[in-house]
Structure formats: C-alpha cells, structure tokens
C-alpha cells in the first residue's frame, strides 16, 4: 500500500487461501464499511458498503456491532481497519542508511519526545520515501508512525468480540493515500493532495511517485468546527490549506500541485470545492474512490456520499 507498512499485521491466516476482506474506517462518529471482490485481473466489484453511526460505547457498542455483523453475514470475515486517535503521531525524518533493526530503533529514538512516559507504550513503524546518495553516506527520507499499543489492542479486541478476524491496522490517512494513488496515479514530478475533513480532525496529505510524502494536521479545522463557523468555514479551511501547501512546497521543493481532493464528512459543505478552486488556484473536487469498481450503482451511498469511503476502500483491496 504505497510502500507503507501496517502499524500492526497479524498473520493468523497463514494456512488459508487469500480472501477478500472487509475494510473498516473507524471514525469518531461512525464506521464506514466496504468490501470489494476481485473477479479477474484488474477487475473488482463492490459487494458491501455501509455507514454505521456510533451512538454507544463499552459493552453496548460490542453488542450492537455483533448484531450488525450477524445481520449482514460478515461473521468470520478478515478485517482491515484504519483508525484516528489523538495518540497517533506521523513525522518526517531523515536518517543515514543502516541495518533494518538499527533503523527501527533510530526511528523510535527520533520520536521519543511524543511519549508521555515510555516509548515502550507505543507501536512504531516507518516507511522509506527515498534514498539520497551522497559522496560519503546514503541518507534516507522517511515517515515515522507511532500510536499507543493500548489503543490498537482495544480496537482488535472489539473486532474479535463481534465476530470479525482482524489482520491489519494502520492510520486513516495512509489508507486514504492508497486510494488516491489508485484513482490519480502520480508520475514523476506530479503531485496530488487531499484534504480529509473528519468530525474532530482534518489532514492535508500529498502523494507523488506512488508514495505518501507529506501529512499535516490542519489546526482548528474539522466537521465539528464547520458547524460552528458556517459561512466562515471555507475561509478558515482555505487559509490552513495554503499554510500546508506552503510547508510542503518548501520542504519538498515543489512548485505545483495538479489536483486537490476533498474527503470526509466535511467535504460536501456547500460550494466548498468551487470556493477552494478559486481561492487556491488548484482544481479541487469531491473525491470519488469508486472509479473503476464495478457494481457500485447497486449501493446508494456510492453515488450519494462517495467522499466518505476513500479510506475504507483503500483497506478493502488488501488480502490476508
């Protein structure tokens, strides 16, 4: 998935044939579900799609989700899930090339300032973006990821209790980046960006050359804030996006972003795409992750709210 490993990969299906899985985008307010069936080389069809509101917690949440899984005949299905959590940290790093075990420890050391107590409380992973060969040393540009172990374990326990078989966990922006690259393949020196506007968080992410290169939270921007700011939301969002573009352009020496996609619950705010296109000077459109997938017309949500399912579809293409 765009050269980015999972935060946690669970090899419980070693003795089974590779199966189609259910992709789950676990948000603050709702779960987005997507299942894609491979029917031939380069051919895929949508077989399940839904959005489920999260209104309960604790034991009642487990009970409700177990009933949902049974009702939709999903019991025993391999599950890949992406998460958004306040403990998640994503950081760009530069380190000299070294053996894998040493590099893993170096990434952990570079991110040690995020820990409230000990880095042993965190799962840490990384993805290499590029190697820079210099006369005396080879340096690596990479993205480091860290999230609290207890958070991941909580998600896994719930998924197992409701009858699914989790095998893959990663940050939501990473899942979304995979779908972006599938829809808008980025060639050399060609860049696309996406704004994911969730209930509590919003992210700017940029892909190029088939890799996720840049992630930046947008301060003070979320669907919750959109409902408060209303007519001023597009102005606030545009300003934060411009700050993110400036930071990305400086750090990567990039002159132009070809296209900007909007995803998440806040993406469909009235006239937002047109306003951002005009103010930023970048073609901006609602993200449709269902391009190239057959049978989408059988699911109303695929046409009514396609911008909600980018991350879930990124996971649905995985096979344990």
Image (tube, rainbow, N blue to C red):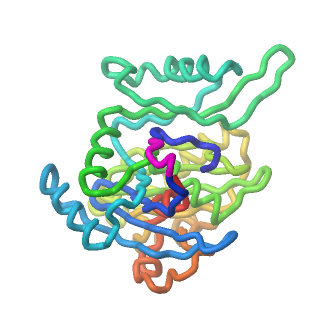
Say which residue appears at 28% left-offset and 65% top-offset: 69
Tell me if residue 291 can be seen.
Answer: no
- Dividing the picture into quadrants, the one containing residue 181 is bottom right
The outermost residue toward the bottom is: 298
The outermost residue toward the top is: 136
Q: How many marks?
A: 0
* Front position in the image: 275 or 185: 185
* Horizontal arrangement in the rendering, residue 117 relative to residue 54 (left or right): right
Say which residue appears at 38% left-offset and 48% top-offset: 83
**Secondary structure mainly formed by the magenta segment:** loop
Q: Position of residue 253 (x, y in %)?
A: 73, 40
Say which residue appears at 74% left-offset and 54% top-offset: 190
* Horizontal arrangement in the rendering, residue 20 relative to residue 113 (left or right): right
Q: Position of residue 260 (x, y in %)?
A: 59, 61
Q: Position of residue 305 (x, y in %)?
A: 42, 75
> Relative to 7, is 177 above or below?
below
* Front position in the image: 64 or 74: 74
Magenta part of the chain: 10-15
Look at the image and say whether residue 143 sits in the magenta stretch. Answer: no
Q: Position of residue 52 (x, y in %)?
A: 28, 67
The outermost residue toward the right is: 135
Tell me if residue 90 can be seen.
Answer: yes
> Relative to 110, is 300 above or below?
below
Say which residue appears at 29% left-offset and 50% top-offset: 160
* Horizontal arrangement in the rendering, residue 155 relative to residue 317 (left or right): left
């Amino acid at each position: 998935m765009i050269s980015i490993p999972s935060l946690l990969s669970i090899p419980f299906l070693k003795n089974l044939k590779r199966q189609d899985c259910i992709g789950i985008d676990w948000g603050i307010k709702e779960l987005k579900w997507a299942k894609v069936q491979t029917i031939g080389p380069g051919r895929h069809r949508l077989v399940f799609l839904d959005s489920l509101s999260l209104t309960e917690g604790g034991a009642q949440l487990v009970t409700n989700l177990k009933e949902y899984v049974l009702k939709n005949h999903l019991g025993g299905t391999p599950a890949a899930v992406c998460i958004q959590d306040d403990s998640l940290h994503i950081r760009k790093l530069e380190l000299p090339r070294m053996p894998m075990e040493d590099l893993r420890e170096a990434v952990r050391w570079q991110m040690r300032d995020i820990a409230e107590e000990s880095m042993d409380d965190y799962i840490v992973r990384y993805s290499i973006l590029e190697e820079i060969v210099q006369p005396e040393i080879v340096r690596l540009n990479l993205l480091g990821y860290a999230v609290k172990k207890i958070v991941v374990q909580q998600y896994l326990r719930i998924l197992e209790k409701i009858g699914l078989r989790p095998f893959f966990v990663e940050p939501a922006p990473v899942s979304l980046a995979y779908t972006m690259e599938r829809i808008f393949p980025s060639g050399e020196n060609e860049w696309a960006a996406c704004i994911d506007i969730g209930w509590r968080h919003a992210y700017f992410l940029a892909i190029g050359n088939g890799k996720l290169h840049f992630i930046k939270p947008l301060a003070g921007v979320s669907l919750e804030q959109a409902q408060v700011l209303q007519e001023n939301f597009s102005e606030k969002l545009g300003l934060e996006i411009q700050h993110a573009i400036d930071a990305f352009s400086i750090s990567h020496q990039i002159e132009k972003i070809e296209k900007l996609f909007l995803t998440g619950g806040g993406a469909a705010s009235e006239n937002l795409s047109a306003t951002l296109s005009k103010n930023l000077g970048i073609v901006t459109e609602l993200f449709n992750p269902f391009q190239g997938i057959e049978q989408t017309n059988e699911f109303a949500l695929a046409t009514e709210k396609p911008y909600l399912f980018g991350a879930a579809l990124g996971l649905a293409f995985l096979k344990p």
